[in-house]
Image (spheres, rainbow, N blue to C red):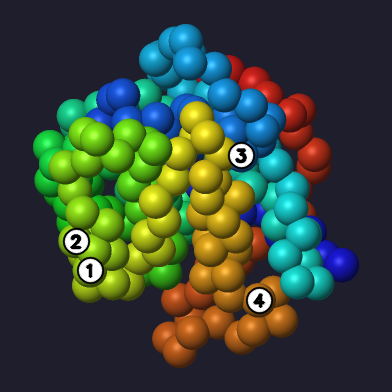
Amino acid sequence: ISLRPLSVYENLCDTGVGKSSIVWRFVEDSFDPNINPTIGASFMTKTVQYQNELHKFLIWDTAGQERKPSCSVAPQALSCFVFQETFSTLKNWVKELRQHGPPNIVVAIAGNKCDLIDVREVMERDAKDYADSIHAIFVETSAKNAININELFIEISRRIPSADASPPSGGKGFKLRRQPSEPQRSCC
């Protein structure tokens, strides 16, 4: 079994959509209803087995923001939305990401807080159709109720080319290399 570090940069969302809660649920399998908004960034890791590889997710949890994202940071990106306004903003983030990010970036879109059925503003079909149109992963999630959190990251693992696979034509593949183990959590 080989170890493959996978960087995930998840700032491509507005504030208050549950980015930190998704990461916390994935890494620690817990939920804090009183979690403080992220200031700056924090870094968390989790290693999961996918087929015959260990995928070590290196997750940058950054504050939601209105400025243009730093798109060249990671080959995987996680974007979140909750309501129609944040879904519209997400489309702008993804447009920037596709224009300025790595050509082989894996984009995952989480429709978070799916447990709030009574206040739903974006229909699952609309979000799924959008994700399909941009070749992105789409998963409805609830960090609070632990719905589809692990499935979201499994889907990211599925989209990552196998370590045995040859890079895409034109040599535009990304290299993954072994890294020394990091502490489980640290803040920036």
Residue 26: which disc? Answer: 3
Quarter holding residue 117: top left
Residue type at tag 4: Ser
- Residue linked to disc 4: 162
Q: Position of residue 73 (x, y in %)?
A: 43, 46
Q: Position of residue 88 (x, y in %)?
A: 13, 46
Residue 129: which disc? Answer: 1
Q: Nearer the viewer, mark 3 or mark 4?
A: 3
Residue type at tag 2: Asp
- Report the label total: 4
Mark 2 residue crowding within 10 angstroms, few (<14) / some (14–19) / many (20+): few
Between 108 and 1, the one nearer to me in the picture: 108
**Residue 160, placed above or below residue 97:** below
Q: Nearer the viewer, mark 2 or mark 3?
A: 2
Q: Nearer the viewer, mark 1 or mark 4?
A: 1
Q: CA distance from mark 1 to mark 2?
A: 5 Å
In the rendered image, is residue 43 in sight?
no
Q: CA distance from mark 1 to mark 3?
A: 25 Å
Label 2–label 3 contact, CB within 8 A: no
Position of 131 with respect to 160 (left or right) is left
Residue type at tag 1: Asp
**Dot 3: what SS?**
helix
Q: Earlier in the sequence, mark 3 or mark 4?
A: 3
Question: Residue sitting at 72 percent across and 65 percent down?
Answer: 50
Q: CA distance from mark 2 to mark 3?
A: 25 Å
Mark 3 residue crowding within 10 angstroms, few (<14) / some (14–19) / many (20+): many
